[in-house]
């Protein structure tokens, strides 16, 4: 298992880090604080900049605007983007990485042609709609229905807490299939935003990740053609779960990027701030906090790299290790963001300092992409299965 990057990849990472520092990071606080409509416009601008630089969809095949980049390299770019702006990372990841993964794995040739290049070029923004008002972590509780018709499907239901919902050009959604009044498994469906019967609610007012819009999707007798089905009818749940293996690893990478910014901000502040006539970094208690941050970040990074390597090698261990990475990295980010606020003292409580925003952003990590509680349940089941 070798995580060394080629000279070309190291050069790409250096260029991308510079791009993020200069083009994305300066707008991160603005994106968090401005009104929703203006924030959405700025977010689209960020995504278009990323696309123009060739930084979106690099894991796609060359036929769809990518470079066939492996996951172990993709997570490094995700960490850099999240380090610059967690909100931009989140929206880009859902649109390009998660929707793209579903289309690559299960899409027809026509579906891939229609959406993948457009995603990589930021001409379209996607959302991945699983969560519902009565079911988030429990995808078996999905209530959205898709019933077959003579020429396609009619969809009814509501999706909630959907990242990119207010700005998405299309949604990939999970629905239970109902034939003649009887349930027949589930399916993933691709629905364009201008489809009659498809509507969206207002952006939700959130604690963190405010620059990445979240909202509700509603389907009322929404009729879609037969080719809106993504993959195999009846297998939607299994397909979604396989997509989530990679998305959890990406989510963990985002948490690492956020944590690195917290560490950098705390370190800079500790060098600058004086108390009792000395820079506070000279105080052991502050130094210990920075040391703990460093240890957690490096450990999380190695765990994410391992999970990505396993995913690249189609190793089934990618699922449990990816869950471990998600839990460890997101909980590390929560701790590190809290310590960064503490290092800043009263200033850490002020919105003019980045750590205040990052503290709010970090809290999503333990909830999104499957709560850390359910991840622990699944990790424990995997451990037990090895002894039965």
Image: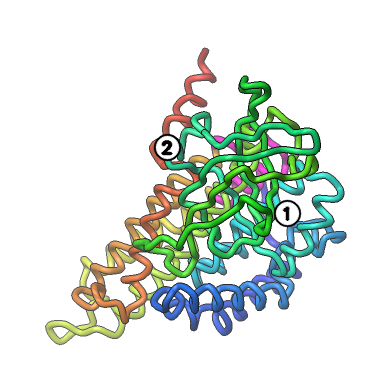
228 and 373: which is toward the camera: 228
Q: Residue at x 68, y 24 (%)?
A: 179
Residue hosting label 1: 70
Describe the element under mark 2 as helix, strand or loop.
Answer: loop
81 and 263: which is toward the camera: 81
Please, which colouring scheme is shown? rainbow
Residue 306 magenta-drawn? yes
**Rendering quarter of residue 147:** top right
Q: Residues within 10 Å of mark 2 (few under 14, many from 20)?
A: some
Q: Where in the figure is residue 264, as x and y percent of width and height?
A: 41, 73
The residue mark sitting in front, 2 or 1, is: 2
Residue hosting label 2: 134
How far apart are labels 2 and 1 at the CA level? Answer: 36 Å
Would residue 96 be visible to someone looking at this image?
no
Which residue reaches farthest left? 276
Q: Residues within 10 Å of mark 1 (few under 14, many from 20)?
A: some
Q: Earlier in the sequence, mark 2 or mark 1?
A: 1
Judge left or right: residue 284 versus residue 35. Answer: left
Describe the element under mark 1 as helix, strand or loop.
Answer: loop
Q: Where in the figure is residue 304, as x and y percent of width and height?
A: 55, 50
Residue 186 magenta-drawn? no
Q: Residue at x 34, y 62 (%)?
A: 207
Would residue 338 be visible to someone looking at this image?
yes
> Over which residues does the magenta segment extend?
304-320
- Location of residue 230 with respect to 12 vertically, above or below: above
Q: Residue at x 56, y 77 (%)?
A: 41
359 and 4: which is toward the camera: 359
Judge left or right: residue 287 versus residue 372. Answer: left
- Location of residue 87 with respect to 61 vertically, above or below: below
């Amino acid at each position: 298992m070798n995580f060394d990057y080629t000279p070309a990849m190291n050069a790409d990472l250096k260029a991308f880090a510079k791009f993020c520092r200069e083009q994305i990071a300066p707008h991160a606080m603005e994106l968090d604080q401005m009104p929703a409509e203006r924030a959405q416009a700025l977010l689209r601008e960020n995504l278009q900049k990323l696309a123009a630089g060739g930084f979106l969809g690099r894991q796609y095949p060359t036929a769809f605007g990518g470079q066939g980049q492996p996951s172990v390299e993709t997570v490094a770019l995700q960490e850099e983007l999240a380090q610059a702006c967690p909100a931009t990372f989140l929206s880009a990841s859902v649109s390009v990485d998660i929707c793209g993964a579903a289309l690559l794995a299960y899409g027809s040739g026509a579906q891939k042609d229609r959406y993948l290049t457009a995603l990589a070029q930021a001409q379209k923004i996607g959302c991945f709609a699983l969560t519902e008002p009565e079911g988030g972590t429990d995808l078996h509780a999905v209530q959205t229905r898709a019933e077959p018709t003579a020429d396609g499907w009619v969809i009814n239901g509501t999706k909630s807490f959907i990242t990119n919902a207010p700005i998405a050009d299309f949604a990939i959604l999970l629905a239970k299939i109902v034939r003649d009044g009887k349930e027949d498994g589930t399916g993933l469906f691709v629905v364009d935003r201008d489809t009659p019967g498809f509507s969206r609610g207002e952006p939700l007012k959130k604690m963190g990740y405010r620059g990445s819009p979240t909202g509700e999707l509603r389907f009322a007798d929404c009729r879609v053609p037969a080719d809106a089905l993504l993959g195999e009818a009846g297998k939607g749940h299994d397909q979604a779960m396989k997509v989530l293996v990679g998305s959890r690893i990406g989510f963990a990478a985002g948490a690492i990027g956020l944590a690195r910014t917290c560490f950098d901000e705390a370190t800079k502040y500790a060098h600058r701030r004086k108390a009792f006539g000395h820079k506070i970094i000279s105080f052991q208690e502050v130094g210990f906090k920075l040391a703990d941050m460093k240890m957690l970040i490096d450990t999380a990074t190695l765990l994410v790299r391992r999970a990505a390597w396993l995913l690249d090698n189609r190793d089934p261990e990618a699922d449990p290790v990816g869950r471990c990475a998600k839990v460890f990295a997101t909980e590390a980010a929560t701790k590190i963001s809290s310590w960064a606020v503490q290092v800043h003292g009263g200033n850490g409580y002020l919105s003019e300092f980045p750590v205040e925003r990052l503290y709010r952003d970090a809290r999503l990590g333990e909830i999104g992409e499957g709560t850390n509680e359910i991840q622990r349940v699944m990790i424990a089941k995997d451990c037990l299965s090895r002894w039965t």
